[in-house]
Amino acid sequence: MTEESSVSNNLREQIQQQIAAFGELVEAHLSVWSKARTPVEFREMELDVAKRCRQLSDGITACVLQDTVSDPSFEREVSVAARQGGLLRQGGRRDVTVTLVGGSRVRLTQLEYLKRNGRRKRRGRPRTKRGKSGTGLYPCLAALGICFGVTPALAGEICAQVADSDSVRAGRSALARRDIDLGHKQTLRIVNGFSARAVAQRQAWLLQARQRQAAKSAVKGMRVVVATDGGRIRERHYKQGRRRANGHRSYDAPWCEPKLLVVYLINDQGKPQRCIFRDDGDAEWLAMVGRRWSGCYPRLWQILFELFAYSGVVTDA
């Protein structure tokens, strides 16, 4: 079966409808867009065109997402894979809303939901909020990297923008110019959630690198520069217990130091030739990963192991 024949006709029709609707929208606004004669009018026109294009992009993405999660074979495959550890059980079917990278929201109906096993009952008042580990997951969404109610592309944009900004509020203001506004609490939850996932991914990658056999060095005979630097920020760690009389919660604000790691090659004159590895632009790495040197040095060891692989170049680098 070819790739073209594997695409359902229903999906093709839905995407064609999205494109046709976009063409009609362009025709309806073209007379207004063409009248832009001043810098202010041209700016407004350009922003409006970009907004309409984001809506088309989200519309096509929503069609593909709807078609993917409604595939019975895909749902069955990811459900079996999610239950292999024995930590999840059937939790029925639920509706869920997912936010796309353009800021649009798509409603997915009747998705399979898996609950966590072995949750002990607590004494006292019943808990009304989820714990840190959550209460379960949607296998179809988890297989596509969709968590915390956002797609992977949107999560990357949010994390990168917040990391590049001096505060969450400033990051949200920059995201709002692209029609992305999820609120302060949800934005912070996405940033912290993906930061924790990035730390777990780093630890798994490091463990895998240590268990792997040494291979031939990829940079043998080359001049390699390994540079790392960091900056100091304060981060709030809320304390357990009741809120204060004013409604606020007590917290500690210790100093943290986000790390940046860059590995690049130089020529005989000392000029940079090619960047091999760089962490500062990776949204999953973020400013939250490797905040202390205890987390940065294992990462540095892992990169050096991958590059030099016992070739005797580590000392020279």
Image: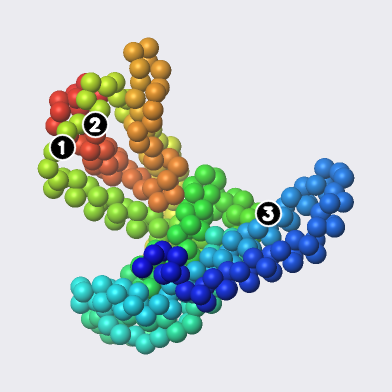
Q: CA distance from mark 3 to mark 1?
A: 47 Å
Callout 3: 10 Å neighbours few (<14), some, many (20+)?
Answer: few
Labelled pair 1, 2 in contact (Cβ < 8 Å): no
- At a point 86% along the width and 44% down the height, the residue shown is 38
Which disc is residue 50 wearing?
3
* Residue 281 drawn above or below residue 185: above
- At a point 78% along the width and 52% down the height, the residue shown is 45
Question: Can residue 147 be seen in this snapshot?
Answer: no
Report the amino acid beneath label 2: Ala
In the picture, residue 269 is in which quadrant?
A: top left
Callout 2: 10 Å neighbours few (<14), some, many (20+)?
Answer: few
Q: CA distance from mark 2 to mark 3?
A: 43 Å
Locate residue 163, reporting x and y percent: 49, 47
Residue on which disc 2 sits: 218
Q: Camera-side residue: 87 or 235?
A: 87
Is 85 situated left or right of 199 in this image?
A: left
Q: Residue furthest top?
A: 269
Residue on which disc 1 sits: 215
Q: What's the coloring here?
A: rainbow
Report the amino acid beneath label 1: Ala
Report the amino acid beneath label 3: Ala
Is 13 situated left or right of 201 in this image?
A: right
Q: CA distance from mark 1 to mark 2?
A: 9 Å
* Residue 13 drawn above or below residue 165: below
